[in-house]
Amino acid sequence: MSAHVLAFAESRGGDLRRAGLEAVTAARRIADARGGQVHAILFGAAGIGAHAAALGAHGADRVIVVEHAGFTHNNPEAVAATIAAKMSGYGAFVATASATGKDVAPRVAAKLQVPMAADATAFEVKGDAITVTHPGYTGKILQSITLTASPAILSVRAGAYLPVANAKAGEVEAVAPAADPAASRVRVTETAAGNSAKLDLGEAPVIVSGGRGLKEAANFSLVEALAAAFGNAAVGATRAVTDDGWRPHADQIGQTGRLVSPDLYIACGISGAIQHLAGMRTSKTIVAINKDTEAPIFKVADYGVVGDVLEILPVLTEAVKRAKAS
Amino acid sequence: MKIAVCIKRVPDMDVRFKIAPSGTAVDETGLKFDISDFDGYAVEAALQIKEKLNAGEVVVISLGGDVVQETLRKAMSMGADRAVQLKADGTHVDSFAIASALAAELKDGGYDLIMFGRMSIDTAHGVTGAIVAELLGLPCVNAISKLEFDGRTAKMRRELEGAYELVECALPAVVTIDEGIARPRYPSLKGIMAAKKKPLETKPAQLPAARLSLDALALPPERAAGRIIGEGTAAVPELVRLLKEEAKVL
C-alpha cells in the first residue's frame, strides 16, 4: 500500500478555501505516520495554480493542478473522476467535510469500490488501518470506526484539523481532467455568494445567535451589532427563527442545520431546545442571555445572564467595543 | 414520474442515549422511532412533485428488520403509493454495503428520480445517496434545498458555506434533500386508514459483507454544569471580565 496521501484542495470562485488547507493538514498526519508524502489536488479555471504555494506552505509536497474552464464552478462529476483516476498511487484520500467535500468524497469512494469514513472529528493511524471518531445521534454518541480497505477514503469535519504552517516543496504537477468537464451531467450554472463579506458559521471563532426571544426579525440588528463589535463573529439562528423566515435557512444552527463549535457561542433569546443544542453544544465557551431562568440553554451555558435580551444586547455590544479598543 | 424515496427508521433524538452492553449499539429500550428528519423532507418533496404533475408513483424503500415496516406505513400514510422492505436484521455500519443493497433494488425499477435525505439523523454519515448514484451510473446532486422541473431537467439549489449553487441535471437522477425544501405533512386519518391497504413488499436485502468495523460507541464528555452569573444589564461588566480573563475569548 502506498504511504502517500491525496488531499482535496477545495477552492471556490478562484479562491483556495480554508477547507483545502485543513484537508492537507489532516492528510499530513497520515503521511507522516506512514513515511509518505502529501499531494494536494486543486481544481479550477485557468490561474487556480497560483494557490500551489499556499498549499506547499501548509504541508503539500506536491500540488496537482487541474485547470479547465469547466471548473469555473464546482463540477463534482469531473472532479471525482479525476481524483479516482489518480488514486492508484495513494493509500488514502482526505477531504474536509464541507458542502463541497461531502459531495465529492463518497463519489470517489464509490468509483474505487471502497467503503469510506465520513465527517471524522479525530482519527488515529494504526499501521494500515485508520480509526476515526465520528459524532452521530446529534452529537450524543461518538462512533469509533476502523477503515482497513485501501485506499482509505475519509472526510474530516471542518475545524477539526486547523491549518498549520509546515513548509514543504509544493512542487506543481499540471494534469488534465480524467473526464471532460463539459460533458458532466450535473451542471452548476451559478455560484452565488449568500453573504460573501461575512464570516461563515463553520469558520468564525465567535458566533452570536438569536432565537424567538428577540421577538421580531428587525431585532436581529442587535445580534448583528454584537457580532460586528467582536469583528470575528458570524450570526446564527434557531430553527424556529429560520422557519418563520426571519433569517435564511443557511443560518440555522442545530440538528438539521449547521453543526458548529466556535471558541465562543453567544445564545441570545434562545431557550435551548434539544434540536438547537445538538448544533452548538461542543462550542468551547457558551454564553446565554434569556429571561427565563428555567430555559434549558442555561444548563449548558458557562456564563448565563438572566434578563431581557433586547435591553442587554446594546449594553454588551458597547462593553465589547470598549474591551476590543483597550 | 416514478419516484423512489429511500428512508431510514431512527430513534427520537430528544433523549439521553445509553449504550447497549455490546458496546457497539445504542440501547433501544424505551426509545421512540420515526422517519429520519431529512428522509421525511424527501418523502414530502416527492409527494408534492406527484401532486403537481397529478401523475406518477412514489415508492418508499427501507433497509432493516421488520420494525421498518412501521416507518414505511407512516410514509404511505403521508401519501406514498407502495413500499419495499429490504430485510436485513442487525445494525449496519458500512454505507457502501447498504448502498449496494439499495442499488440492487433500484437498478431495474425504472425510476425517474431517486431521493434520499442528505444524511440520517442517527449515524449521520451522509454518503449513501451519492454511492447509490455512482453504483447505478446515475447523476447525483447532493443536499438540495430547492427542486423544480423544466420538462425532464431538474433545476436545483444547493446551500454552501456562505453561498449557494444553482444546479441542473437531466432525469433520471439521484438527489439528496436538505432542510428548507418542504415541511413534511402529518398523516391524515384517511391517509392512515388507506396506508393499511397499500402494498408493502418484503424481500431479502442483497447486503454484501461490511468492509469497515464499528469498534465502539462512547458518550461524549459532559459539559460542566451551567452557571448563571447575574441578572440584567448589571451583569454585563462581570460577563465581559469573565470572557476576557477566564475564557480568554475577548
Image: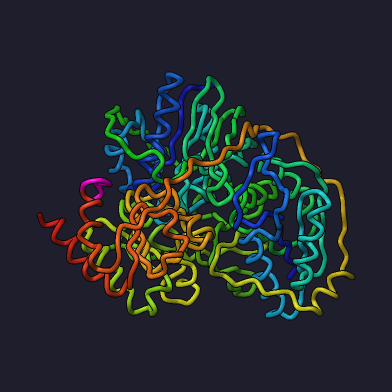
Residue in view at x 76 percent, y 45 percent: B101
**Is residue B246 a member of the stretch shown in magenta?**
yes
- Residue B86 image point, x, y percent: 81, 50
Quadrant for the N terminus of chain A, please: top right
Q: Give the extent of the magenta segment.
A: B245-250
Q: Is residue B130 left or right of residue A254?
A: right
The quadrant the C terminus of chain A occupies is: bottom left
Choose between B47 and B3: the one closer to the eye.
B47
Q: Nearer the viewer, residue A11 or A207?
A: A207
Figure label count: 0
Frontmost residue, A84 versus A292: A292
Residue B188 in picture, x, y percent from top left: 76, 78
Residue extending farthest left? A326
Q: Position of residue B153 (x, y in %)?
A: 60, 69
Horizontal side of residue B186 vs B14, given as left or right: right
Q: Note whether A309 is above or below A83 in the view shown.
A: below
Which residue is drawn at the image coordinates 63% and 44% (left, top)?
A: B18
At horizontal 55% and vertical 59% (from top left) the residue drawn is B143
Q: Is residue B178 magenta?
A: no
Left or right: A216, with A320 as reference point: right
Residue A66 picture quarter? top left
> Visible in this render: residue B41?
yes
The chief SS type of the magenta part is loop
Rendered location of residue B109, percent (x, y): 80, 58
Q: How is the image coloured?
A: rainbow
Q: Is residue B96 visible?
A: no
Q: Is residue A123 shown above or below B116?
A: above
Q: Is residue B170 above or below residue A32?
A: below
Question: Who's the residue at 41% across and 59% down the image?
Answer: A298
